[in-house]
Amino acid sequence: MITYIIRRLLYAIPILIGVNLITFALFFVVNTPEDMARMALGMKRVTPEAIERWKAERGYDKPLLYNAQKDGPRKFTETIFVEKSAAMFAFDFGQADDGRDIASEIRTRAGPSLAIALPVFVVGLVTMISVALLMVFFRATYVDTSGVVLCVALMSISALFYIIAGQYLVAKVWRLVPISGYSGSWDALRFLMLPVVIGVVSGIGAGARWYRTLFLEEINREYVRTARAKGLSELQVLFRHVLRNGLIPILTASVAAIPLLFMGSLLTESFFGIPGLGSYTIDAINHQDFGVVRSMVFLGSVLYIVGLVLTDISYTWADPRVRLE
Amino acid sequence: MLPFKPALLWTDLLMFVLVLALLAVTWHIRRREHLAAPWRKVAMSRAGMASATLLALFAGIGLLDSLHYRPALPDEPVAAASKAAAETRYAVELRSVLDLLLDPLPSQVETTYSAPLATRAFNKTVIEGDEGTQRDYPRLRYGGAHLADDRGGVAADVAGRALSGALGGLAAGLGALALLALLLSPRRALERVLAWVTGNGHDAVHWAAWTLLGVTTLGGVLAALASGYHVFGTDKVGQDVLYQILKSIRTALVIGTLTTLVTLPFGVVLGIAAGYFRGWIDDLIQYLYTTLNSIPGVLLIAAAVLMTQVYMDTHPESFETVTARADFRLLFLCLILGITSWTGLARLLRGETLKLRELEYVQAAQAFGVSSWSILGRHILPNVMHIVLIALVMDFSGLVLAEAVLSYVGVGVDPSMISFGTMINSARLEMAREPMVWWALAAAFVFMFVLVLAANLFADAVRDALDPRTRVRGVA
Amino acid sequence: MSQQPLLSVRDLAVDLHLAGRALRVVSGIDLDIGRGETFALLGESGCGKSMTALALMRLLPDVGAIAGGHVRLDGEDILARPEALMRELRGQRMAMIFQEPMLSLNPVMTIGSQIGEVLTEHLGLSEGAAAVRTIELLQSVGIADPVRRINEYPFQLSGGMKQRVMIAMALAGEPELLIADEPTTALDVTIQAQVLDLLKRLQAERGMSLLLITHDLGVVANMAHHVAVMYAGQVVESGTSAQVLHHPRHPYTRLLLNALPEVTGPNQRLATIPGQVPPLDGGIAGCRFAPRCSWVQDACHSQAPEWSGASRDGIRCPHADTLPPLPEALRSMNPAASGTPQPPLLQLQDVRVHFPIRAGLLRRQVGAVKAVDGVSLSIPPGRTLALVGESGCGKTTVGKAIVRLNTLTGGDISFQGRDWSGLQGEALRARRNQVQIVFQDPYASLDPRMRVADILMEGMTALGVGNSPADRLKRVDRLLDQVGLPSAARWRFPHEFSGGQRQRIAIARALAVEPRLIVCDEPTSALDVSVQAQILNLLKDLQDELGVAYLLISHNLSVVEYLAHEVAVMYLGRIVEQGEAKLVLKRPQHPYTQALLSAIPRVDIARQPQRIVLAGELPSPADPPEGCHFNPRCSYADRTCRQAYPGSVIADGRAVSCHHMVLTGGAYVAAPVKPALAPDN
């Protein structure tokens, strides 16, 4: 088990290097820092000095891969690649365009992101599983069919609609909660309620429908017939036998998503003005702050890989047949 | 001396390539009973048939909007004078056949907001009238302009137009059915039309007929109203919302289908190669897709789109027109969406190929010394094709929804391109106005919902018919 | 039968609703099962026997429904019970076990909790009491160390153990009737013997009734007091099993028995039943067996035969008693060509195929699954060598090594005296036509997306057999004719054919490139008895006609007996006994061969040898036992056996690898050693 985890973590290294190379290529090779400076400063009437200053401020004034002017190992270290890309392995993300330290910004913003994403995740999972079980219990009746149709309809609605309609109805017309905003204390509950509900509702259609098929697949297996042959009631069959097996893919798939909860939700956070990582990312995209976007890409990849390892571990925990080696 | 000059955008070209490919596949399938049988099951599904009809109508609109041309400019006096310059000059702006059909809707631009079916603007402005200047809601330039008295006669006019439009639409729908029936079997056409309309058939085809009639009736109403009003109102710059909706359909279709053109070769080739060859090829491909998967999708798209933006800004000379520029960005968006989404298909196919390669008919081929690539092409590919098809139809709706979100985030299509995403993006700020400007948003959401719902229902029908196990796989 | 039967079924009908059509899969079944009796319901696949069993428990799948009839348990019609009350019967008065023990247990629950569930549900035991009782139950079904086992999961048990657990679970509610649906079909023959013995013992001990659903005539002969034979949803004949098996009256039963190689004997053609079971979607006017019956008369096609006789002793054929005997075999088969020893066509010399096991941080090889570990064989041209053994013994791996579908770890193979295992690339490809293979599963061995002609031409094209496409197409026609299919079949797809027809296509595919040797990997084990006979006849005919040699891989010794000239018995990657088929099968010398032969349930119980019950199951080839691989299961095993692997000696005209072969009067025979190891379960 330990060997397995170590091996998986070692395997993460080439992946992160790959991610790093992709972002490096995307941000510095396809377009040079020169291009970026030009765009940031406006296309017309840019003096070469202004561009140089812009580059120097951000440390983009060095060569990409090989610095001929330095000597020794510094020929390689004093380059954009090492300082901007490779440095991320040490979680040194540098500064944003507004001069703030990206790493500390990420630390402070992870909290609000989690405050939304975690409840959405937990409440959503429980709701989707319950709805799916309900449909499976009433399978092949009109409860099930109309449930499926409703799910398909729900998943055909744009996430933007859920947010906009929710904000309009609940916050603007009914005035039940504030439209947007956030606060650090328990007061935040007021602000979080609506986004959490919206987050759960918008995910229910796709999730419940998928879980339903997972459960249905289990219910057609032969061990279920054995359980019925024992004289168990349909509810006992469902909760004791089907649920346990059907939950395995659900739990492991969910575990993979847990680390990514830190990344926050782009739409929800920006609509509700929550100072999390999602809105941070959106702002960075809108302001074309490449440093922040690069950092978030790297962070996302790290969290994804953590999720992969957690998935494998959760398999051994959820499914006695799986032994990692 | 054509009055127009055909113009082919990259996305147009690819759309038509796709249509041709689709026709070729259909022809191929029709000739093979075992391939056609599952599709006949789709024809047995009511929701499948109804949604297929809707999708076909959407596709029709999208394709009409993909036939671009540049209209000839009216001869300028100077040019007309000099006979030597016999060359006709064409407009810089591209128009599509759809624009032509909708004429004069595209050009009926008001000054600013107006509500659906309104005859007057949404805001008061200073009007200079006979009795001096006053602040009032001015009459619209086009909406209800045919009415002498716009205060009393609107309801009656609208009702009259709607009724005649509905009847006309219904008649057109019946006409279309009759035409179709004539094409299918000239002798028993009437019988067929009757069976379709009354639902006496034993399959679900009449659902398609009913959907068609419903849509043409509704379309008739819309068309009749649109000839005198802005059915869904106008937006901030006075553009007709109905027109924007119709234009958005093409964008959604392009995103939903062209992306799969990118996904397909990557997903299929890499997926089955990884599963069949195993070993280092498998390791490499798995590494590739794990790496790509590990980058948060939106961020990768954002980064790539930002970079294209930089490229387009620094190379303005490469793009003749604004449309070409927007088209380039659209194509690039499809490309990058495809690159981020082939991994799911590849993983699926890898798993299936791992199972297939152990099957005995593959081993029998190996025992004949058949080469690996022949085995892949002859045995593996045809036997995973149903997965590919299911994945493609399932992906479509997700991509349409994704476009809206990406455009909202600012990394979707070019802001100058009309799409559901850009419509929602520009309309959402209007929610804060009092009274609220809701029509553009509502129209965009409703049409997007109908399109995505139809796509989802169709995908369900296809999956039920094609998947031997009839189950949803966790398509990422 | 004087007393009232425990279970009485009258006119039971079951419908399956598939793709909008109703199939009457069971139509009007009458059964009477007495107390303490073993009643067998015999039939080939698709005859409706499993649906009958499920209907009795009211456990039909969602698409199935009972369409009529009565099922009386102790006089009470259980079909009238509401579902909630039906549950009280299931698991308590009637229990059921299924064919696939590996799929029938919940994979994520411990076996203790799966058995305990029945005890707490039906007997109202507390958790603690249930655990104690569970251990007793596991002990009674012969599971060693039950205290440890109750906390294990199904995947930690072997197939045979899982079926024992299923039986324990069924017994937990102390049922009066146990329904066993093909309980041993998925198991190896030695394990089958263990499980059948167990069922027999438990049934006798508890005086419970056993309804045994099976396709295996040998199992019926060995287990059942009474039997009902099903065909196409109906019972066609019933009676005591001795009566039905030895004096069959219905044409179907007669043909079925004569299709068995064991009954017919090696030098005769097997009886075959042409055609297939008619579709069950109604519209059958006459006798359902008429289209396939050898004695068919005009009236049979129009008049549905009535049941005559008692429900437990009757027949559904008005002509049964006036039928002439089955014509003697159409022609006697050529006796095995003997005499001049020919140079071998194929020779295996110490062949090893190991699959590496990797572990640790760097995925270093830490061991190997020694699937094949030093096998030497030789096959003369035009003859059949059978490779027999239980699943997991490595016989299929040998077959694939011969066809060059896997790589050898050691040893070499020569073909027609020339190197074969060393050939690579073009050189290999140029000779691939010489050795071909026919697989077990006719459903997986034909590409569903290719037409028959394309399937048959694939090899011809790849190996350059035939000059032009037209020429190849001509060959396709000839091949189809050779394997008994109409040439119209060539433009059809595999799914349009039945299992037996598909196997014919697979044989034609192998023949297409004119091989000298065909590896037949369990060619009939996925087929019904009547179809099996057709394929065996075909293989024999083709050998006579074309002089092709076969390597027959099989676990079915009666098939081997019928086809093979020579037999090699394989155990855990090595050959333990090898020689002329008659000698090995009639007078087995190696203790394993003896046990294997004794485990096969014979239809003719008089010929059933004294059962030698093997303890335990096949060990893992990754970790074979020290010394003789067979020693942990062998009753003769002593210290020598646990220390060294025995060398091969010639005993009684065949090669045997056993320490207990002693020289007596010029021949080795198995030494009469007292069993040193009592079977532990």
Image: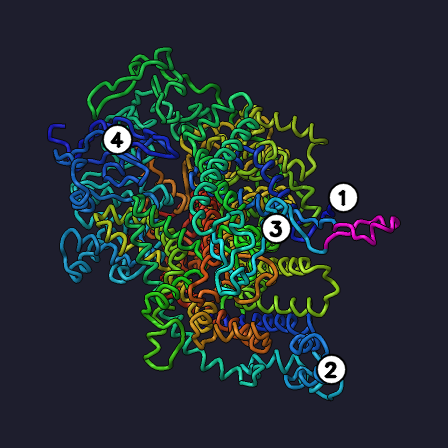
Mark pair 1, 4: CA separation: 74 Å
Q: Magenta residues, as a range? A: B73-91
Badge 3 amino acid: Asp
Residue depicted at 53% across the width and 50% down the height: B145
Look at discs 1 and 2 and give the one toward the viewer.
1
Give the quadrant of residue B32. top right
Mark pair 3, 2: CA separation: 78 Å
Look at the numbered discs 1 and 4 and tell me whether their residues touch, using CB distance below 8 Å.
no
Colour option used: rainbow
Look at discs 3 and 4 and give the one toward the viewer.
4
Give the quadrant of residue C35. top left
Local packing at callout 1 (Cα closer than 10 Å; few below 14, some 14-19, many 20+) is few
**Residue under pointer 1:** B2
**Residue under pointer 4:** C67
Residue B77 on the magenta span? yes
To the question of a shared chain for discs 3 and 4, the answer is yes
In this rendering, does residue C19 appear at all?
Answer: yes
Mark pair 1, 2: CA separation: 47 Å
